[in-house]
Image: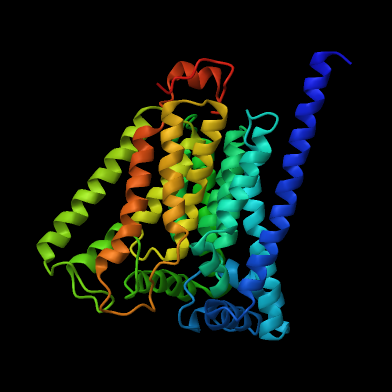
Amino acid sequence: MDTHDTASAQRSVVEWALWGLVVVGAIVLIRQRYLGAVAGIGMDFELFYLPAASELVTGGNPYDVYGYVYSPFVALLMAPLTELATMAAFEIWSAAMVGALVASASTVALWPGLRGWRRPVLVGAAILTTMRFWPVEISLFLGQVNSLVLLAFTTAIAAAVNGRPYISAVLLGLGGGLKTWPILFGFGLLGRPTRPGPIITFVLVGLAAPGLALALGGTSWVVSMATGSSDMASQRLISHSIFGFTDLAFDETGLAAPVVESQVVELATRIVLMLILLASLARLFARGVDQQTALVHVAGAAVLVVPVSHLAYLMFVLPLVWWWLYRLLGTPSRRTAAGFALLFVWWLVASRSWPDNNSPADLSALRYGVLFACTYISVVGSCWLSPSGHRAEAKANPLGAPTSMRASHDS
């Protein structure tokens, strides 16, 4: 065996060893997250999801259940669980949600351009950052549907980066059909190559949710779905968005001690923060970025603009962490290192157990502001650090994969 064959065999052993570590680590994390979730019965699952499914199964109106503001898709998904005891149903649901989380992180294995040890490193990092993330634990503990939305979104990214724009569009539409606000992720389809077909497909699939409500319950269900979402957008809960932070910091909400009470300061701060975010996104799109880049940044921005952005919604920023690591492994440079460092610090901060809705009302709004500021700076900073997608580069590499073989345009 010559030197080349020996080196190749060694690389193969290292790669398989890394995959083995990924599998073992994933099994350990799956067990931890599942046992943590079923330590009790998820409040949202017990109060909203399962009762709404029971209403649907018995011919009733799921929107008669207070707090159920989702499309009929969610109630239909849970319909088979209504025959079981509540705890047994929650255990099955929790297992499915944990599985969806691992599958979501594992979709990075479908991102092209990485070879050898880099791929298991990316997959392992994606699984670790997902399964050891406090907002994810909150979502599982409450029995929420966010894991399915994340799976639809991450699979849509994988489809887009592999040149399957219609599949990507369908998945984005389905994700928006499960929960209303993730329909905003569809703006990522405006990344290159922008085609009208997938955008039209996305709109049509997105309309399936109100269409199903119309088919099953008539206009009253559609109205209930719309008004319910609107009512929940104004609920007095801790929100980690631009609207939520400015509300806490400059108004008497009863949720936290404001920095100063001033409607003028609140409005001015809100406008400035929104303009900076939108300008950063506009610059990103103006540089001709691919759909993968567009999708991960649009998701991060969406979390920042939703009126009531729960702590669990921060899981939709995770693909941005994976994307920067993907760039760093494929085209190492000071820019990709800085981008990954920025998002990794965000993950470390967001992974802590932060105060939320059950925290004392006299807690300073600045405590909540630390997490919001870190998320905001990370998303905006990522927009500015992201490499441009020159027309020539887009033509040579339409899938947007990192290409260490060619000269990087990161500088």
For the question of whether residue 170 can be seen, the reply is no
Q: Quadrant of residue 307?
A: bottom left
Q: Residue at x 55, y 70 (%)?
A: 144
Residue 63: x, y in percent? Answer: 49, 79
Q: Residue at x 31, y 65 (%)?
A: 368
Vertical relation: 115 (above or below) 373: above
Vertical relation: 243 (above or below) 224: above
Residue 180: x, y in percent? Answer: 46, 61
In the foreground, 80 or 405: 405
Q: Quadrant of residue 146?
A: bottom right
Residue 129: x, y in percent? Answer: 55, 52
Q: How is the image coloured?
A: rainbow
Report the number of discs: 0
For the question of whether residue 229 can be seen, the reply is yes
Vertical relation: 328 (above or below) 404: below
Q: Residue at x 60, y 46 (%)?
A: 125
Q: Residue at x 64, y 43 (%)?
A: 123
Vertical relation: 67 (above or below) 206: below
In the rendered view, does 167 fall on the left or right side of 252? right
Q: Quadrant of residue 59?
A: bottom right
In the foreground, 60 or 180: 180
In the foreground, 42 or 260: 260
- Quarter containing the C terminus: top left
In the foreground, 277 or 223: 277
- Quarter containing the N terminus: top right
Residue sticking out furthest to the top: 2
Residue 17: x, y in percent? Answer: 76, 40
